Amino acid sequence: DCMRSDTAIAIVISQIQMDNDPKQLDEYWEVLVQCLKAWASSASSSAQRRTCFNEIASLRGYVDHKTEVCHVFGDAELAVGNYNDANFYLSKVICNSQLVSPELYETVSNLRNSLVVRWSFRMHNDLRRNLEFCSAISSYLSAHPQATVLDLGAGTGLLSLYASKGGASKVYAVEQDEVMSGICSRVTRNTPCISVAGCCSRDFDISEHHVDLVITETLDSIGIGEGIVESCYDLATRSNNPLLRFIPSSVLLKGFLVHSDILHRSSFCGKYRTKVGTPAEPYCCEYIGEFPDVVQMSNPVDLLSVNLGNRLDARSVRLVNVRVTCSSWCDGVCSYFIAHLYADHSITSAPEMIKMDASRMECWEQGFHPLPRRYLKNGETARLKLEISSHSVLVSWAVAEDNPPSADASALEPAQIKLLNSNFAQSDCVELLNLVPKIIDIGGLLLSDPFSFPNIAHVKFFGYVVHSKKLRSWTRVHGPALYLGQAAEAALITHEMDKYRTLTHQNVPWSTLEHIKLSECIQLLQLSRDHTIEKSGMLEFISLSPGHIPTALVFWVELVTVGGARFISSYEPLWRPAAVIFHDTPSSSSSSSRGGRYSLSLAYKSASLSASIVQSC
């Protein structure tokens, strides 16, 4: 009782090894199990427990006490969340014991379900994928009957079953994951020609078996991300068969430029634990076609091609030219693979927007390689730098931008202004990223004086005048300035900027709200640190639709830091424009008779913009 449990275990093990008295041996085992209960939960690592278990499993009498020992280790692993190891021990309890409680059966069943990777279900339910692999394997075995097949990364053994059905004389299913190899063993137990090896492919002695064909589906969204190139090269170099074939035989990686505000924001602003687009995380996996704002900016180009069994350089660099087919801000590269299986059988992870001859699979996502946002014009050639390793591709701009595009919004349409957050989420603008929520709320209204932050150099207001009966009716009761955008509750604000009211039914996006645009986009005011308290101005414009009364000024704010980084609050869907409602505007008949000429009076005071409008003669 006063001895450390690990010391006690060592003493008891030595006694078991030396004592030949069967009765004394049983007593020692009872003591050992009690010591294990005290020690297993306090062991510093799963590796320590596995080492101790392996030593105990070699002792005399282990078979008679296997159930108790495995139960102790299994409970200890389960308590610390090591579900894979817990399944290893508790599965031995079930296999070794005649009487097992329903609770233990349920525990092990839940463990196994949690350890099966979710994407495995998508793969097995992708009928087109399964059909292409089955057809390719059958085609090879028809030409090479009685061949010996190695299934690399066998998973549940589906491809091994295809090989057996196709006429293979022997199939070696190699799967290093304990749970998946256990499932594979149960799935293939009635197929004598299939042997399951629960090990890494590097530990499988391919030279001992005359393997004719290696089949594998260790493909990720970009084809090479699961190490298929390294694994196949290792097998090819250790094989003694010069005619060794692989299915797939080759992988081609293709890609095209894309614009997407949603992808840009998520990849740069914290959706992923590691920043995407760095050597640590060169790309993320997404169903590109599911993003509603994705714009394809170029035709697909070849990024990388590799024949399996060959080796890629440890780190090679390639430059690729891409011709732009659509003017927009480029946010990154969407990549997908085309894998040639055998004969005329191929599979691809291409998104639906790409027309393909190969069979399109549903189980794979596409790779998204984010780039610092850059405006590209139709017809120009973008140059990409690819840093290629055996399992990843890091994409970057080959040439730094000599002349960054102007962010002067006064000459642009609102649709273009929405794209002007070119530097908002880039790595060099973390400072601005942290400042924006403190200065501007999601409704585009200022929360505080921007110049109270030393990094803000300029503040600009842009906007246009609209006619909207809905806006006017909403604000007759609730005040002169409001949010425009989709939200659970749209807040309405008074001039004092400290009295908020909510209107729960105002959850309509500004873009879908019925309105008529009466002016072009204009720069309203520009502030610098010389105007930290108050500024006013007057603008004149001619209405684009003289028969309609000006209802409101829809506006947004641009922040510019000392370093030149910019943010504009019309950046939907995260940010929204705001509006100031006009009162006492002239009638529509008066507006038409005077040609629709107006003067817009603007005032900035105490971090608030106000506006009024009068008709000019």
Image: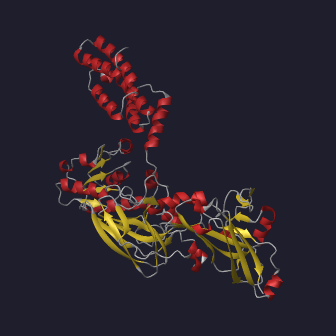
Q: Is residue 491 left or right of residue 204?
A: right
Q: Is residue 133 left or right of residue 520?
A: left
In the picture, the quarter occupied by the N terminus is top left
- x and y percentages locating residue 324 in the rendered image: 43, 78
- x and y percentages locating residue 216 in the rendered image: 32, 56
- x and y percentages locating residue 417 in the rendered image: 57, 73
- The answer to whether one can see residue 242 in this image is yes
Q: Is residue 558 left or right of residue 56?
A: right
Q: Residue at x 50, y 30 (%)?
A: 103
Q: Quadrant of residue 589?
A: bottom right
- The answer to whether one can see residue 291 in this image is no
From the viewer's side, name the closer residue of 220 and 587. Answer: 587
Query: In the picture shown, does residue 98 fall above or below 217?
Result: above
Q: Residue furthest front?
A: 530
Q: Quadrant of residue 285?
A: bottom left
Q: Residue at x 45, y 38 (%)?
A: 111
The structure's colour scheme is secondary structure
From the viewer's side, name the closer residue of 295 and 561. Answer: 561
From the viewer's side, name the closer residue of 45 and 376. Answer: 376
From the viewer's side, name the closer residue of 480 and 9. Answer: 480
- The number of callouts visible is 0
Q: Is residue 481 left or right of residue 429?
A: right
In the picture, the quarter occupied by the C terminus is bottom right
- x and y percentages locating residue 179 in the rendered image: 38, 42
Query: In the picture shown, does residue 427 fall above or below 411?
Result: above
